[in-house]
Image (spheres, rainbow, N blue to C red):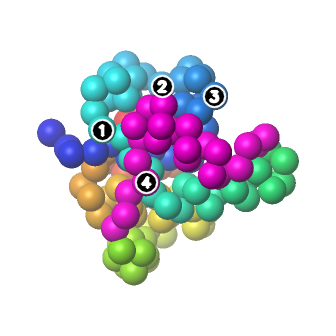
């Protein structure tokens, strides 16, 4: 069993907002049972989404809530290692997705995501 389940940005937002519609039973069960974490890249994407008006709260408020209320932690592997893992992931041009998947891959961890491309290419995606 993995030591942690990684969260895509969309899932971090869904947890913050209390809306998990669309996730399958396996993903919901994992959220209830397993330790959860997100890549620091998720924080940057959250902040950019806030800056363009797609999120009302910024990354700090969302991270604080996730940590304090749901015990979701920010993973802390070396960024250089995450980037090295991301280099061959040419199936997406989205740098956030590429780094988020790479971080999960580096940890050999499942990634909870609704993104169809990530689910198709990352075998541990839930």
N-terminal of the pair, mark 4 or mark 2, is 2
- Of 126 and 9, the residue lying toward us: 9
Residue under label 3: 17
The residue furthest left is 1
User: Taking 80 as reference, is 28 above or below it?
Assistant: above
Q: Is mark 2 on a helix, strand or loop?
A: loop
The CA span between labels 3 and 2 is: 14 Å
N-terminal of the pair, mark 4 or mark 1, is 1
User: Taking 59 as reference, is 67 above or below it?
Assistant: above
Residue under label 1: 35
Image coordinates for residue 44, horizontal then vertical, percent:
62, 61
User: Taking 93 as reference, is 72 above or below it?
Assistant: above
N-terminal of the pair, mark 3 or mark 4, is 3
Residue under label 4: 74
N-terminal of the pair, mark 1 or mark 3, is 3
Q: Is there CB contact under 8 Å for labels 2 and 1?
A: no
Q: In this view, does 84 lie to the left or right of 21?
A: left
Q: In this view, does 66 lie to the left or right of 123?
A: right
The quadrant in which residue 12 appears is top right
Image coordinates for residue 79, horizontal then vertical, percent:
42, 75
* Magenta stretch encompasses residue 75: yes
């Amino acid at each position: 069993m993995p030591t942690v389940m990684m969260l895509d940005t969309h899932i971090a937002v869904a947890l913050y907002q209390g809306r998990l519609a669309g996730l399958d039973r396996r993903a919901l069960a994992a959220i209830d049972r397993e330790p959860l974490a997100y890549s620091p890249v998720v924080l940057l994407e959250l902040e950019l989404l806030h800056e363009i008006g797609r999120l009302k709260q910024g990354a700090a408020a969302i991270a604080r809530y996730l940590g304090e209320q749901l015990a979701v932690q920010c993973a802390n592997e070396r960024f250089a290692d995450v980037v090295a893992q991301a280099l061959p992931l040419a199936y997406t041009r989205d740098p956030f997705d590429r780094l988020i998947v790479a971080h999960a891959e580096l940890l050999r961890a499942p990634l909870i995501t609704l993104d169809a491309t990530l689910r198709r290419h990352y075998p541990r995606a839930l």
